[in-house]
Image (spheres, rainbow, N blue to C red):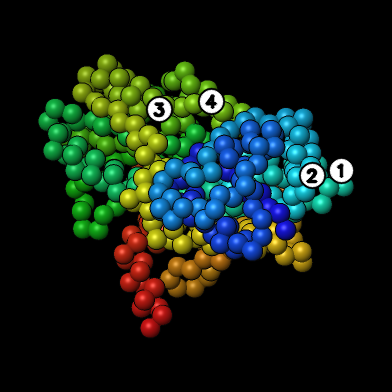
Amino acid sequence: MRLVIGQTGAPTAVVNRSVAGFLDASREHEVLLARGGPDALVRAALDPLPPGGLPAGEVERGGSWLGGGRRATTPEDVDAIVAGLAARDVDGLCLVGGNGTMALLDAVARRATERGVALRTAGIPKTIDNDLDGVDHAPGYASAARFVSTVVQDIARDHRAMTSIEPVRIVETMGRATGWLALAATLPVTGDDEHVVHRVHLPELGFDVEEFLTDVAGLVERHGRALVVVSEGVATDLTAAPIHAANHTTLLVGGVARRLAELVTTRLGLPARGEVLGVAQRCASHLVSAADAREAVEVGGLAAATLLDPAAPTAVMVGVQRRPGPGYRAHHPLVPLAEVAARVRTVPERWRRRDPADLGDFHAWLAPLVTPQADSTAAIALEAS
């Protein structure tokens, strides 16, 4: 069979592992690469897999070997994609990405069926925002969450040391419409009750500037300082950036944390710093979680196997779900693209809390996902014995 794999959207710290899993499972077949996101598909710019395939050194690196990209695709674009794939006699298409990617893949699958083009399609989930339906968590999120939880704990220690001259610090995470990464920043370090996040603000909860300022003043009065985490999309009226531009095609460079820090200083008279964690959240390969590394490979391999098996369903995404029972184990059901395309998975109501002290259930859910690689290796060895 002749398969095509491409990625849309931004990289994650583990997306190259998904590509490696796909290429390994399809090694007996021809694979073409759509490098650079949806533009490559529209132009039918499909490159042959180079000799040796994915270089071994690329698998564990951040960034994206396939290259990313975004495009607000039109019906004409979808027609061009189907025509280009048909002209190259492509049997199966796999795209790696989030809800927008799955919407594109669903549109391609539907158009191919309408035109009588025999094309199998399978999606590999990938997003640090964790806003994708059909998964307990998306590959990429766990490593981003590990980065955020680790770095914010260090920021908390730094903040405590600088309290006398900088009583308020506001840390901004990625998350245009959902607060999954901001919540990850509240994961506590066992035995360290001094270096904590005092508040977390999620887009799901809305935002009121006056309430925010009153709360910050109260935190400083009670604790001597206030460490606050905000999602980048929590107060869109305070920044000029069009947070919800179609298909995330507008570049965001952060800013709400700095704007809020300015308000704290001018309105409350309290020195404040706004910190933007930036793209390091999605590409820090040195803080990849064990579960993320393993599951990224698994979903890639299963996507290829699904395309190659004529008896398997098509127009599906490989899911990630937890198995019931003690400990953490995942399995990968196939989810129809129509059930995930363009849908935003927000933080559940039970975890929409501003006080991290009320997030114990979320912390228990997150903890096994952010286990370091070394700890995971030991755990796997114990299970095997």
Q: SS class of the residue under badge 3?
A: loop
Label 4 vs 2, first from the N-terminus: 2
Name the kind of residue labelled 4 in the image.
Thr
* 3 and 2 marks in contact (CB < 8 Å): no
Residue drawn at x 19%, y 43% is: 157
In this view of the protein, which residue sits in the foreground, 58 or 285?
58
* 1 and 2 marks in contact (CB < 8 Å): yes
Query: What residue would you read off at disc 4?
Result: 250
Residue drawn at x 42%, y 26% is: 253
Query: What residue would you read off at disc 2?
Result: 86
Number of the front mark, 3 or 2: 2
Name the kind of residue labelled 2 in the image.
Ala
Number of the front mark, 1 or 2: 2
Query: What residue would you read off at disc 3?
Result: 254
Q: Is residue 171 left or right of residue 142?
A: left
Number of the front mark, 1 or 4: 1
CA–CA distance between discs 3 and 1?
A: 43 Å
Q: Is residue 342 left or right of residue 146?
A: right
Q: Residue furthest front?
A: 51
Number of the front mark, 4 or 2: 2
Q: Position of residue 324 (x, y in %)?
A: 53, 70
Residue drawn at x 51%, y 60% is: 297
In this view of the protein, which residue sits in the foreground, 183 or 205?
183
* 3 and 4 marks in contact (CB < 8 Å): no
Is 383 located above or below residue 202 in the figure? below
CA–CA distance between discs 3 and 2?
A: 41 Å
Tag count in the figure? Answer: 4
Name the kind of residue labelled 3 in the image.
Gly
Q: SS class of the residue under badge 2?
A: helix
Q: Residues within 10 Å of mark 3 (few under 14, many from 20)?
A: many
Name the kind of residue labelled 1 in the image.
Arg
